[in-house]
Amino acid sequence: MACGKSVLVWAFAFSLCLGVSQCYYTIPLKIYPGKFNSSSDLDLTRLQRIQTSGGNVLSLASDPAGIVNFLDMVNNLQGDSGRGYYMEMSIGTPGQKLNILVDTGSSNFAVAAAPHPFITHYFNTELSSTYQSAGRTVAVRYTQGNWEGELGIDRVSIPNGPNGTITINIAAILSSEGFFLPGVNWQGILGLAYPILARPDSSVEPFFNSMVRQMGIPDVFSLQMCGAGLSASSTADPLGGSLIMGGAEPTLYRGSMWYTPLKEEWYYQVEVLKLEVGDQNLNLDCREYNMDKAIVDSGTTLLRLPVNVFNAVVEAITHTSLLYIQPITDVEGTLDCFRFGVSSSANGLVIGATVMEGFYVVFDRAQRRVGFAPSNCAVNGGAALSEIAGPFSAADVAADCAGGVLKEPLLWVISYALMGVCALVLIILLLLLVLPCRRRDHSGEITDESSLVRHRIK
């Protein structure tokens, strides 16, 4: 059957509070992230069931073995976009409970293993009878902050997750800079991206890969992050959200589930076709939006745009009456600050937490796609703070929106390396020709070295 091309549009809103009254402004910033094929075997109205690689169909409510019950995972997250979304885990034997930040933009599972002034407790490896050091050091640098530590292996269970315990790679953080911040209530990070991003190399199997392999659950997880709107940010105990491991829970979203394909399996990279501010199309070459990549990343706070795109958005906003600011909480949990909801980026377009808060996002790794539907917690006074629509006409679909910068600039590295080698050889030859040295050969005669070089390269 022939498939028609369609595109996906996101329109999301931030909220603004002025004084004692609450004034809400819809922010119709629309992003068209990629193409998908619509056919009879793809249910666009609702994600009802998930097909496993073995051909078995797993109900979204629970599985026959009792490993996965999605309703048990609802509301297993705490936090907000400013301080991150985290869940409780039990690590080691006996179990030590820590709050772990959920991050779809990295691949290491790492926990504090030493005291730090900004955290209340840490994972003590000496108190776990099942912890084994791998004898390897590891270091990870993020857009903000970095840490160093040692790799090890231990057992982990999730109180509000799939039933059972798994053995996973764990990075014990021994030192860090700008990673743990004042006011955060988490002591580690759960990287949910692909093995290629794992450090020190891709042989370090990420947490979710281990869970899929050991528990046999479908290679799908989904996120609902409920910090959107003032109601979720005005208290010291935010609404939090849900991380569903093994599938998606239909009660967490409204309307249809829409998909866009993954372009690459490292970050969750998608393709952005167009961006509008209000009804104003930025009219940029779509390759600008994907320079050098466009990813979905729960660990990044804002919507981050390549510099040219960011400048175009700011210019468009100055010609409208729209406000792209959102309220944030301070360390004490009081609502008295605001920030611009968009920032510039030097390393690609990042669809961060403030955008994801409007949607229930399905990371369907089994079918290499990301799904979006309006979240049922992104509402205020019964009115939705986000919307999603489609399909759109072929005129909205660009032919080729691939970014102009290589994801991993290996070819550039090789090219420059070869150029450097050639330049070095040329310099050496020139030195030998211009400044000949004299040496005694085996027969005892004095020989001009430069003449020997010229003879060899003829």
Image (cartoon, rainbow, N blue to C red):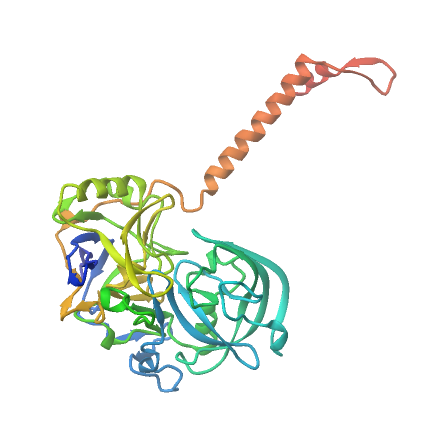
Q: Is residue 419 above or below residue 26?
A: above
Q: Is residue 83 left or right of residue 448?
A: left
- Give x and y (percent) for residue 385: 18, 63
Whether residue 200 appears in this view of the structure is no
The answer to which quarter of the image holds residue 389 is bottom left
Q: Is residue 56 left or right of residue 256?
A: right
Q: Residue at x 43, y 68 (%)?
A: 185
The answer to which quarter of the image holds residue 238 is bottom left
Image quadrant in which the N terminus is located: bottom left
- Give x and y (percent) for residue 4: 17, 57
The answer to which quarter of the image holds residue 106 is bottom left
Q: Residue at x 44, y 52 (%)?
A: 144
- Give x and y (percent) for residue 437: 75, 15
Whether residue 391 appears in this view of the structure is yes
Q: Is residue 143 left or right of residue 234?
A: right
Q: Residue at x 31, y 60 (%)?
A: 353
In this rendered view, identify the residue nearer to me: 235 or 147: 235
Callout count: 0
Furthest residue toward right: 444
Q: Is residue 307 above or below residue 390?
A: above
- Give x and y (percent) for residue 51: 31, 74
Image quadrant in which the C terminus is located: top right
In this rendered view, identify the residue nearer to me: 257 or 453: 257
Q: Is residue 434 above or below residue 442?
A: above
